[in-house]
Image: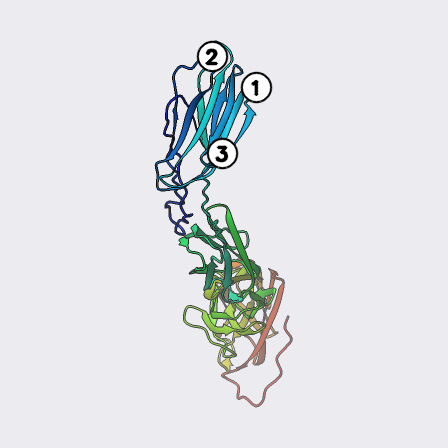
């Protein structure tokens, strides 16, 4: 700034002088510049009273009391309109008259240079033309001392790079490296990074300050939870709104299991059903540590099959590794005993939590299966002796047989005497058993018929079984030879027809 003083006596204004520019250390706070100006004193000397119409001498002295030169010093002396300037002699510099802002005349003494400790004078001759007092107003101004300091503007910048595998396995953890570089000229403060996978925002990691020209690296673990193409985005941010990002597309490969179970849609209770299980990897990554477990239908029994891989005692198959597109096949047998829907369940599990399940149903029907056996007496037998014929009816099926009718028939020459095992009606040549209401699975009914032959020869015995549930008709026939004790046996005759 300029130095300006108005005085009647000497004044000593001070202005800051200039020194060389000073630049602060990078990244720190220090003195940028300082200035110091010359120390000026201006004195006015002359009479305090003068005679009207007579010139009087006044001396204006400019002194530089510092060790620095003063440049462009202007000393201004006010001249009222009733005072005439009759002379102005400077020891150095130049003078000129000018009017101030209010129109009053001034004499300006200009010194281009006032050396350190220097002294210069201006001699004035002033003559009043009116009987009025006046003030000798003196002020001075010194050219302002300018100074400048170069301020360096530092600009931090961020660059980011993401490196790591391009192929991942689903559920597997991989490590990615994020490199953050500051190519700018200033420090990047409060730097943080994060790795986002798809639409999932990653965890933020603080890196602190990254200096100009420096870089920092951080390793981030990523577990792929989405199969297919996955977009990875590394983000870096710093104070002052600095942001940058880097993208990387990776392929997440996943094993996918598929189960096919082939089995009979219909079986009869007690029969063995064979199921073929095919486990396929329809994904694009190997399936490791594959184990298949089979749960048999309730009430069924496992029947070993020697063809193909064999299970453990818990009905599990260790299938090992399945490459993409590969499959494994095994068979399992089960004796189905319970009527109704029989559900065979297959569960397959592998590494990385891959799994597949499959259920196949077989409808099981239960039937009654009757078997008829006739046990005739061991012959030959004498005529007139009571002989026992035995009828056995067995239900070999899985369902009760209902309304069973049994009829025993004899040929001519032999007649039934009595019946045991169930109520029956004896008629010539036949035994008609009353209907048997129910015969459970596995149950056997034994009926006995006692008969007596009246003639010799081969006599036939026939048993017939009919049933409504299930519809059944069974017949069994045998013959027994009879002879007379009092007549020599010279030959035999054919038995008669069944009546």
The kind of secondary structure element at disc 1 is loop
Q: Nearer the viewer, mark 2 or mark 1?
A: 2
Q: Nearer the viewer, mark 1 or mark 3?
A: 3
Label pair 1/3, CB-CB below 8 angstroms: no
For disc 3, the marked residue is: 110
In depth, the one of 435 and 192 nearer the eye is 192
Query: In which quadrant of the rendered view does residue 411 lie?
Result: bottom right
Asked if one can make out residue 395 in the rendered structure from this viewpoint, the answer is no
Query: In which quadrant of the rendered view does residue 216 lie?
Result: bottom left
In depth, the one of 293 and 238 nearer the eye is 238
Q: Position of residue 263 (x, y in %)?
A: 58, 68
The kind of secondary structure element at disc 2 is loop
Query: In which quadrant of the rendered view does residue 139 lie?
Result: top left
* Cα–Cα gap, marks 1 and 3: 20 Å
Circle 1 residues within 10 Å: few <14, some 14–19, many ≥20: few
* Cα–Cα gap, marks 2 and 1: 24 Å
Q: Position of residue 32 (x, y in %)?
A: 40, 45
Placement of the C terminus among the 4 image quadrants:
bottom right
Circle 2 residues within 10 Å: few <14, some 14–19, many ≥20: some
Q: What's the coloring here?
A: rainbow
Residue 191 relative to residue 245: left or right: left
For disc 2, the marked residue is: 52
The kind of secondary structure element at disc 3 is strand
For disc 1, the marked residue is: 103
In depth, the one of 466 and 184 nearer the eye is 184
Residue at position x 50%, y 11% from top? Answer: 130
> Sequence-wise, which precedes: disc 1 or disc 3?
1
Placement of the N terminus among the 4 image quadrants:
top left
Residue 193 sits above or below residue 462 on the image = above
Residue 99 sits above or below residue 388 on the image = above
> Sequence-wise, which precedes: disc 2 or disc 3?
2
């Amino acid at each position: 700034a300029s130095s300006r003083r108005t005085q009647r006596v000497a004044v000593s204004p001070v202005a800051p002088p200039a020194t060389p520019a000073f630049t602060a250390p990078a990244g720190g706070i220090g003195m940028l510049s300082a200035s110091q100006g010359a120390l000026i004193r201006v004195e006015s000397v002359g009479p305090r009273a003068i005679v009207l119409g007579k010139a009087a001498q006044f001396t204006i002295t400019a002194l530089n009391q510092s060790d620095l030169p003063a440049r462009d010093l202007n000393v201004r002396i006010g001249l009222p309109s009733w005072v005439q300037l009759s002379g102005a002699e400077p020891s150095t510099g130049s003078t000129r008259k000018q009017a101030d802002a209010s129109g009053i005349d001034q004499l300006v003494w200009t010194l281009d240079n006032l050396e350190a400790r220097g002294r210069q004078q201006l001699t004035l001759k002033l003559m009043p033309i009116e009987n009025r007092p006046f003030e000798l107003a003196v002020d001075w101004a010194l050219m302002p001392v300018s100074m400048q300091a170069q301020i360096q503007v530092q600009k931090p910048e961020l660059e980011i790079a993401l490196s790591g595998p391009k192929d991942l396995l689903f559920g597997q953890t991989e490590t990615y490296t994020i490199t953050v570089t500051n190519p700018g000229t200033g420090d990047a403060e409060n730097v943080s990074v994060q790795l986002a996978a798809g639409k999932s925002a990653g965890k933020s990691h603080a890196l602190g300050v990254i200096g100009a020209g420096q870089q920092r690296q951080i390793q981030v673990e990523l577990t792929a939870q989405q199969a297919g193409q996955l977009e990875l985005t590394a983000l870096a941010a710093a104070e002052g709104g600095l942001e940058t990002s880097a993208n990387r597309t990776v392929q997440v490969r996943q094993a996918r299991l598929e189960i096919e179970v082939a089995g009979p849609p219909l079986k009869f209770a007690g029969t063995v059903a064979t199921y073929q299980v095919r486990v396929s990897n329809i994904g694009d990554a190997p399936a490791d540590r594959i184990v298949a477990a089979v749960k048999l239908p309730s009430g069924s029994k496992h029947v070993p099959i020697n063809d193909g891989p064999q299970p453990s005692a818990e009905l599990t198959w260790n299938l090992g590794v399945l490459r993409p597109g590969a499959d494994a096949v095994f068979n399992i047998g089960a004796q189905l005993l319970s009527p109704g829907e029989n559900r065979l369940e297959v569960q397959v599990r592998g590494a990385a939590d891959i799994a597949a399940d499959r259920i196949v149903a077989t409808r099981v029907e239960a039937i009654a299966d009757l078997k008829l056996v006739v046990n005739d007496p061991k012959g030959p037998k004498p005529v007139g002796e009571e002989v026992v014929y035995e009828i056995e009816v067995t239900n070999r099926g899985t369902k009760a047989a209902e309304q069973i009718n049994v009829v025993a028939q004899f040929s001519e020459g032999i007649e039934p005497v009595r019946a045991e095992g169930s109520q029956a009606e004896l008629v010539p040549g036949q035994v008609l058993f009353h209907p048997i209401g129910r015969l459970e699975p596995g149950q056997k009914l034994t009926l006995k018929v006692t008969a007596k032959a009246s003639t010799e020869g081969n006599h036939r015995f026939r048993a017939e079984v009919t049933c409504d549930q299930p519809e059944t008709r069974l017949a069994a026939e045998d013959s027994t030879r009879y002879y007379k004790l009092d007549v020599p046996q010279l030959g035999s005759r054919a038995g008669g027809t069944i009546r």
